[in-house]
Image (cartoon, grey):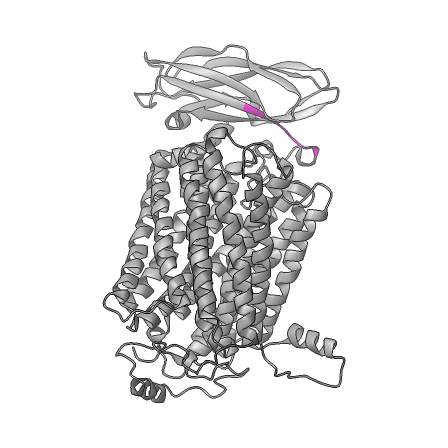
Amino acid sequence: MSTRRHTIALLALAVGMFGFAFTLVPMYRTFCEWTGLNGRAALRAGAAPAAVPEEREVTVQFLAQVANGLPWEFRPVEAQMRVRLGAIATTRFYVRNRARIAVTGQAVPSIAPSTAATHLTKLECFCFSQQRLNAGAAREMPVRFYVDKDLPRQVRTLTLSYTLFQVPDAVRGEAGS
Amino acid sequence: MHTHVEHATARNPFIAFAARWLLTTNHKEIGTLYLWFSFTMFFVAGAMAMVIRAELFQPGLQLVEPNFYNQMVTLHGLIMVFGAVMPAFVGLANWMIPMMIGAPDMALPRINNFSFWVLPFAFTMLLSSLAMEGGAPNFGWTFYAPLSTTYGPPSTDYFVFGVHLMGISSVLGAINIIVTILNLRAPGMKLMQMPLFVWTWLVTAFLLIMAMPVLAGAVTMVLTDRHFGTSFFQAAGGGDPVMFQHIFWFFGHPEVYIMILPGFGIASQVIPTFARKPLFGYRSMVYAVMAIAFLSFVVWGHHMFTTGMPLGAELLFMYTTMAIAIPTGVKVFNWVATLWRGSLTFETPMLFALGFVIMFTIGGFSGLMLALVPADFQYQDTFFVVAHFHYVLYPGAIFGTMAAVYYWLPKWTGNYYDERLGKIHFWAAAIGVNLTFFPMHFAGLAGMPRRVVDYSLQFADFNRISTIGAFILGLTQLLFLYIVIKAIRGGKKATARAWEGAWGLEWTVPSPAPLHTFETPPDLARVREEEAGFGAPAGAGATLR
């Protein structure tokens, strides 16, 4: 009977669309990684630079902010630096737990302008893993990175910013991918 | 409305009454239930709008706490969308679609009963949150994360399950409508011979099936983020709050067409009737509805231009959004062309339909302004947006529904409504709508943000006018309620073909329509002959194309 067939097909469509809502999550992630939007490309360690460094230099600025509710002090040790394209640079971020208990944080990076996002590669970063600080503990966290030579000509200044979020105890250990 | 009680036994009359309405599987009775439910929710959410407007009458905090104001804004939006507009259209579909296609009932009558009776539970859950500790949801009907995840009040969980129930109701209702239209048409009625109200509902039902489950997914993610340790929208766990907006608006934009396409269908029934001409450009109307429905799935980004989207995506969403103006323009052109050289009369349904066309078009134009990326950066989150979507929803969806109610009341009740009161209702509502929402354009352009309980002094005049208009508009709907009750209780008797220019199968059954119609399918060839005998113009009526 075609009533029955149509009903089943339409129910399947509805269930499929419910599933589709959840496939939007990996699709969104893949899209962001592919385009370098949203700082997604910057969440994994990249490969070392292939070519010899170039003469061209750019300014890289560092920003650090703490999301609501995380009782931490967080700032870059140096506000900005000049780097040659293709040369590995190292900088550090200072973080201190002002709370009287141990807290876990996760830094989420973002790079502006977005056209430069795929050209800044991090070799080592505290954002690759969660940071757990005991009460009152402080730490300097290194970032090793380079800017590759395919950076668009018009970009002379990049901003690498980090936001530190508190990781609820329920999700500790599974994040930071 | 009907005196016919199927299961009237020697039982207690209250139990018999309750059982009749709880257990009914009749499409007309379920349609009536939907319409009364929608009418009730319309007044509930309307009362909340009055609280909002009263608070905004002058700058400063007068009547309510900011948090309660936010709860009013949230519930007003949710209830108007899911409790008033959508059930009204489903109610009209239930009443009219079987009669317009010559079917004895909906294809899945028990599911039909279930779809309706889920709704009172859904809205009881949602409204009960007002009495809870921490108050009702206060994050706006769009429930952006992290407002609904990290910062949502405890009652957010009731909101989540309420939305799940509303989704189940709409999806089952939509499946029922599609199956009915595909399988129960009178023998010989081709798809391209269906009345436009049926066509617009067929397309709307597909939008519902494809959009509502995505909303259900979004609220499920909010729920698991709140309680089960997931991080869909939490940056700390690797999620992203902006992704919430993508998922929400992937549902949200088709949703706005769900709320307007049946209105397009109603205008396409009413205007030809009172212009006494067949609808101009029937085929292009059908294709335009399909084009709008398709485009509605690829424009969601225009709600998010200021989220830091790349230029390429902004351009793409801007062009797809502006492309919607083309099929919409086709529709407006066809309505105007139907009026051209028609023998026009201005009964109340016609007034509401014309108000619909004119004022919906104003809302469409402000939509075009919002579609422009550079301009949107100024308009985003201002009262200009509020003015825009109220212009497409109030004179669009709600005037459309009112046109339909006046148009089909004689068929439902067997009585004409009071024409003089109907006209007063229209003019008061038309003045009220424009007085309420037109000044909001200016307030928004001048920079007044939306969703605020207090505002700067320079917006005081615009807001005072809006509030006066809103109270006029609210009061006129009490008149509407009175007119409907009066028509149910009596009035000038209507003939089967209640309107001189009305053609189509629903007008071949007596007024009031008996509980069971088309138990044997109509003979389209005979109906065609009869309509021609009554002087139907070539190309008019459901059966004559």
Evaluate whether residue B254 shows in this view: no
The quarter of the displayed image where residue B500 is located: bottom left
Residue at the image point whose x is 71% and y is 40% from the top: B134
| Image position of B221 (left or right of B327) | right
Residue at the image point whose x is 48% and y is 48% from the top: B469
* Residue B124 spot, x, y in % from top left: 67, 57
Evaluate whether residue B280 shows in this view: yes
Residue at the image point whose x is 33% and y is 69% from the top: B345
* Residue B423 spot, x, y in % from top left: 43, 64
Q: Nearer the viewer, residue B1 or A14?
A: B1
Residue range (magenta): A163-169
| Image position of B541 (left or right of B30) | left
* Residue B486 spot, x, y in % from top left: 55, 71
* Residue B210 spot, x, y in % from top left: 47, 58
Q: Nearer the viewer, residue A107 or B498?
A: B498
Check the image and report above or below for B85 versus B73: below
- Please identify the quadrant where the C terminus of chain A is shown: top right
Residue A166 part of the magenta segment: yes
Check the image and report above or below for B370 versus A43: below
